Amino acid sequence: EDKVVQSPLSLVVHEGDTVTLNCSYEVTNFRSLLWYKQEKKAPTFLFMLTSSGIEKKSGRLSSILDKKELFSILNITATQTGDSAIYLCAVEALFKREYGNKLVFGAGTILRVKS
Amino acid sequence: ETGVTQSPTHLIKTRGQQVTLRCSSQSGHNTVSWYQQALGQGPQFIFQYYREEENGRGNFPPRFSGLQFPNYSSELNVNALELDDSALYLCASSLFPNHEQYFGPGTRLTVT
């Protein structure tokens, strides 16, 4: 069965701290790994990773994928209160026989940044 | 170009009732996927529709069913509602199956 596990489940830090969120997966027909930020409703896309070892960066956020160890991390440097949210890791898996894809999500990491 | 829209925003139903949720895909997108997100969990894949047919399905019982229309909009129907069906239901559209999925704002369903 496809599985995505995130850790830690929750995290409280102070503004300015650096955080690392973890995501491990066991998914058949892997295509990509995605990170989302969810505040109140729909997840907001952050990164899509398809190749091992290539860091993707957007401002204070960065992420990297290790396809050998089936693992990804999301780093946030110089955290701000606006970073408080649930961070979701999802793996895109292709359907075995049909033409299509699904996202397999982890339970998320709840990040709270205190001022 | 309009994004993915869903209706209603939220609704409350009683156990045993039936509910229909609606999704309009982003302009030009012909594939719609539905996800259920229970409180404290990540979204779970329900099914995907392409060319008005179910293209793939997750581990949800048959009382979860869907439709896709010629204009690519979609409906999620849930029969015989149970308390555990209370969740945020997310719709995502993509240009084709296997392409990046764009999420709508979701419908919050509460079953009492």
Image (cartoon, coloured by chain):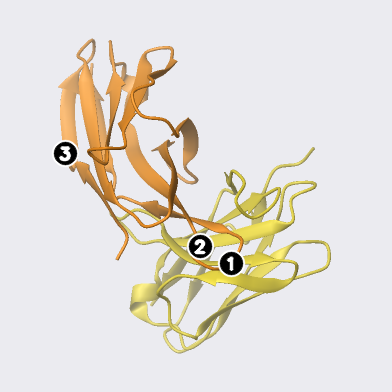
Q: Chain A, which colour?
A: orange
Label 3: which secondary element: loop
Which disc, if any, is residue A8? 3
In the rendered image, the quadrant that contains the C terminus of chain B is bottom left
Chain B on-screen colour: yellow
Q: Is residue A107 above or below residue B110?
A: above
The answer for how far apart the CA atoms under marks 3 and 2 are is 29 Å
Which mark, by number, is residue A32? Answer: none
- Marks 1 and 2 sit apart, C-alpha to C-alpha, by 6 Å
Is the residue under label 2 in contact with that under label 1 (CB below 8 Å)? yes
- Alpha-carbon neighbours of circle 3 within 10 Å: few (<14), some, or many (≥20)? some
> How many numbered callouts?
3
Instruction: Report crowding for label 1: few under 14, some 14 to 19, many 20 or more residues within 10 A (C-alpha).
Output: few
Question: What residue sits right under mark 2 in the picture?
Answer: A95
The answer to whether residue B22 of the structure is visible from this angle is yes
Q: Toward the viewer: B20 or B64? A: B64
Which residue in the structure is indicated by mark 1?
A98
Mark 3 residue type: Pro
Coordinates of residue B89 in the picture (x, y in percent) = 50, 61
In what element is the residue under mark 1?
Answer: loop
Q: Where does the N terminus of chain B fall, quadrant-wise? A: top right
Which residue: 33% across, 39% down? Answer: A86
Q: Nearer the viewer, mark 3 or mark 2?
A: 2
Chain letter of disc 2 in the image: A
Q: Please give the name of the residue rendered at 43% of the width and 42% of the height, measured from the top-left corner.
A: A40
Residue A23 lies, with reference to residue B25, above or below; the image says: above
Horizontal placement of B107 versus A81: left or right?
right
Sequence order check, earlier mark of 3 and 1: 3
- Does residue A48 appear left or right of residue B66 in this picture? left
Q: Residues within 10 Å of mark 2 (few under 14, many from 20)?
A: some
Amino acid at pointer 2? Phe
Q: Chain of mark 3?
A: A
